[in-house]
Amino acid sequence: MERRTLFAGRLLPILLIMPQLLITLVFFYWPAGQAIWSSFTRADPFGQHEDFVGFDNFTDLFTDPLYLASIARTAVFCAGVAAVSMGLALLLAVCADRELRGRAVYRILLIWPYAVAPAVAGVLWILLMHPQIGLIGHWLNSVGIHWDYKLDDLQAMLLVILASAWKQVSYNFIFMLAGLQSVPKAVIEAARMDGAGGWRRFRTISLPLLMPTVFFLLVVNLVYAAFETFPTILAITQGGPGQSTETLVVKVYRDGVINLDIGGSSAQSVVLMLAVILLTALQFRFLGNRGGE
């Protein structure tokens, strides 16, 4: 039976939701509205004068080869972060779902990295992978493997993918483990009695039942990689060498804060906001269809 809370009047419910509405209005809708308006204007570097230019900023954006290259670079980066973080999380969740000694401690240790701030995570990976002072980076150079992510484009991209994925593994692990534990044990036991091996049970039973969780995490990880990895990338490579790790959110920062192109960076922000809305709509549509089956 569904339980509902009934109020005698309308004033109390309005007062209860008013703080959250004010926070949403001040920290989301107002900045979003400002960004949308700025995307249709062109201002001088000092912000003293601005002209309405319509869709010129968007036209310049999608005819700029640097921006188009940044889109492709962001797609590769997001795909890499999602694949690495979700793959490792699934592997660790499968291991943690078994009867292991010290399983509770094992799970707690796997969750800890999620509490690390993105910028701090970037600093930790610098201490590991820096070619001169990093533990692993210095060792790689000492054994004859040339490692310098500050000069090599591929190494820089690989490092920021690993650092960003490491930060997100814990979040994915929680959901993957919860999804695996929700699989009916009777079904698994029936498949075991029929002679199905571990890999076959996982492929034919656990993984199909886990797909709604996987799709949810896929959208979450794509949004995370596109937006929340900015401090990690800025701490490790600052978008370099050159523009090799300059994702869309880093380009927004460079164009808006450093180059003072307010109109162009606002147009980029609007494009990113539309991309997130599209991904979220696809997620709700997919999960809604799954729930109605």
Image: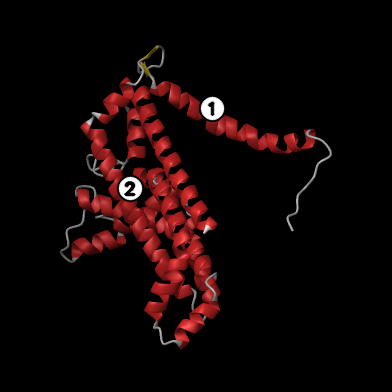
Rate crowding at label 1 as few (under 14), some (14 to 19) or many (20 or more) other CA atoms within 10 Å.
few
Whether residue 125 is visible here, answered yes or no, is no
Q: What scheme was used to colour the molecule? A: secondary structure
Residue sitting nearer the eye, 88 or 205 = 205
Task: Give x and y (percent) for residue 116.
Answer: 47, 54
In the picture, measured across the screen, residue 69 lies left or right of residue 187, that is left
How many marks the image carries: the answer is: 2
Q: Residue at x 32, y 29 (%)?
A: 255
Q: Of label 1 and label 2, which has the lower sequence position? A: 1
Pointer 2 residue: 236
Rate crowding at label 2 as few (under 14), some (14 to 19) or many (20 or more) other CA atoms within 10 Å.
many
Under tag 2, what secondary structure?
Answer: helix
Whether residue 17 is visible here, answered yes or no, is yes
Residue sitting nearer the eye, 109 or 85 = 85
Residue sitting nearer the eye, 224 or 179 = 179
Pointer 1 residue: 30
Task: Give x and y (percent) for residue 252.
Answer: 35, 33
* Label at residue 65: none
Q: Is residue 113 above or below residue 75?
A: below
